[in-house]
């Protein structure tokens, strides 16, 4: 395990992406996103995928200097193409557009097609919350060419991890936010356990015969992810597929050789809603703060030290890691430095 400050890590990520062919703006925005993910304790979406991004650029699956653009637009909606650039760049542009429209129209919906991995979805709903908006992100389409998840009651793969994120602003309290895959575990966690020889929690995956397993090797031998929460998580997983791929029509924008098998059909829907749509924001914020405080005041059950509100863990991680630095696992750092070396960047 090594430790880097946020500034050190940001400079390194940006240097690698610039060397790989990104322009200044795109490299900076991706570095902002990845480092904030690490600061938030979401290491699966921090610097971990840098080797994937570098390889994607080298294979021309990612166009690192391309810019997003609007394909179609109304006063309350837009469909955005990422033009096969970094997903973080396209998604930031789309959420900024949704926020701008919602400021005058109260509610806005923006879809995105033709982009690579968009990273931590919570990043975008936090953007909305910072502007006194409720933000939502729904992402699907990843299983069209590379299915990884069995449906509830099924034994073969058909969907993917299909993530969702919703963020709601507060007043004095932190943003109430969640961001998770609709599978029991993210794909990165299964991948890391596989490479590290670790076991998975029960009911995370099934083997090739549809039998629940805790051995990550079974996933790579023809098994699949399980939806979280049984049939309830499965219905949310299907909803993200509808709101992501089907609603945006992302299949119509697929181009051979772009974005890779997992990302090529990706469709993302972002929604921004003014939190003060039905009442003054001060009243909304007062009620939001009271709700968070009431939840945290509940006595903890046996085995727990306290009750948290959604988003508390990320907020606390940022305070701690800005102070103490960002810890990076040895295998992640090794892959990161190898990716840097492949584009001529030497990290001491």
Image (cartoon, grey):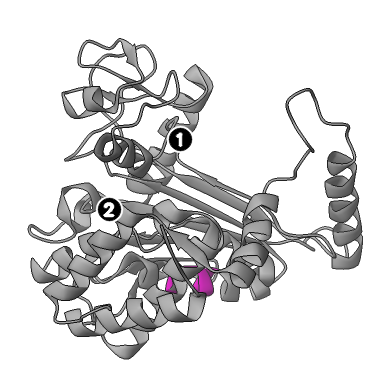
Which one is in front, 345 or 186? Answer: 345
Label 2 Cα crowd, 10 Å radius (few <14 / some 14-19 / many 20+): many
* Residue located 36% across and 68% down the image: 80
The tally of labels here is: 2
* Among the 4 quarters of the image, the one containing residue 47: bottom left
Q: Which is nearer the N-term, disc 1 or disc 2? A: 1
Can I make out residue 106 in this image?
no
The residue singled out by tag 1 in the image is 182
Q: How many angstroms separate mark 1 from mark 2 (CA)?
A: 20 Å
- Which residue is the extreme one toward the bottom? 24
* Residue located 44% across and 19% down the image: 202
Q: Position of residue 323 (x, y in %)?
A: 64, 71
Q: Which residues are magenta?
A: 93-98
* Residue located 58% across and 60% down the image: 125
* Residue located 33% across and 46% down the image: 245
The residue singled out by tag 2 in the image is 250
Q: Report the side of 334 relative to 163 (left or right).
A: left
Query: Within the magenta stretch, is there residue 136?
Result: no
């Amino acid at each position: 395990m090594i430790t880097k400050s946020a500034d050190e890590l940001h400079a390194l990520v940006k240097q690698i992406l610039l060397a790989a062919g990104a322009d200044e703006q795109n490299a900076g925005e991706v570095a902002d996103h990845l480092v904030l993910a690490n600061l938030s304790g979401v290491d699966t979406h921090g610097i971990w995928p840098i080797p994937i991004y570098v390889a994607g650029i080298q294979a021309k699956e990612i166009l690192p200097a391309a810019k997003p653009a609007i394909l179609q637009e109304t006063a309350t909606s837009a469909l955005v193409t990422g033009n096969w650039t970094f997903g973080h760049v396209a998604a930031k542009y789309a959420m900024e557009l949704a926020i701008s429209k919602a400021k005058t129209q109260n509610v806005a919906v923006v879809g995105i097609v033709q982009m690579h991995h968009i990273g931590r979805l919570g990043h975008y709903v936090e953007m909305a919350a910072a502007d006194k908006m409720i933000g939502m992100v729904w992402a699907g389409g990843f299983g069209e060419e590379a299915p990884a998840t069995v449906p509830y009651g099924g034994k073969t793969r058909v969907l993917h991890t299909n993530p969702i994120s919703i963020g709601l602003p507060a007043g004095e309290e932190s943003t109430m936010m969640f961001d998770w895959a609709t599978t029991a575990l993210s794909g990165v966690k299964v991948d890391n356990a596989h490479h590290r020889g670790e076991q998975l929690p029960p009911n995370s995956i099934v083997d090739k015969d549809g039998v629940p397993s805790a051995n990550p090797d079974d996933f790579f031998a023809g098994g699949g992810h399980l939806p979280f929460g049984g049939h309830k998580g499965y219905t949310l997983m299907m909803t993200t597929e509808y709101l992501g791929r089907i609603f945006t029509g992302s299949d119509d924008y697929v181009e051979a050789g772009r974005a890779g098998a997992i990302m090529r059909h990706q469709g993302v829907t972002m929604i921004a809603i003014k939190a003060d749509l039905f009442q003054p924001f001060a009243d909304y914020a007062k009620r939001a703060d009271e709700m968070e405080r009431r939840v945290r005041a509940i006595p903890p059950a046996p085995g727990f030290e306290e009750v948290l509100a959604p988003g508390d863990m990320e907020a606390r991680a940022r305070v701690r890691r800005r102070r103490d630095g960002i810890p990076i696992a040895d295998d992640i750092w090794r892959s990161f430095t190898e990716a840097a070396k492949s584009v001529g960047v030497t990290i001491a």
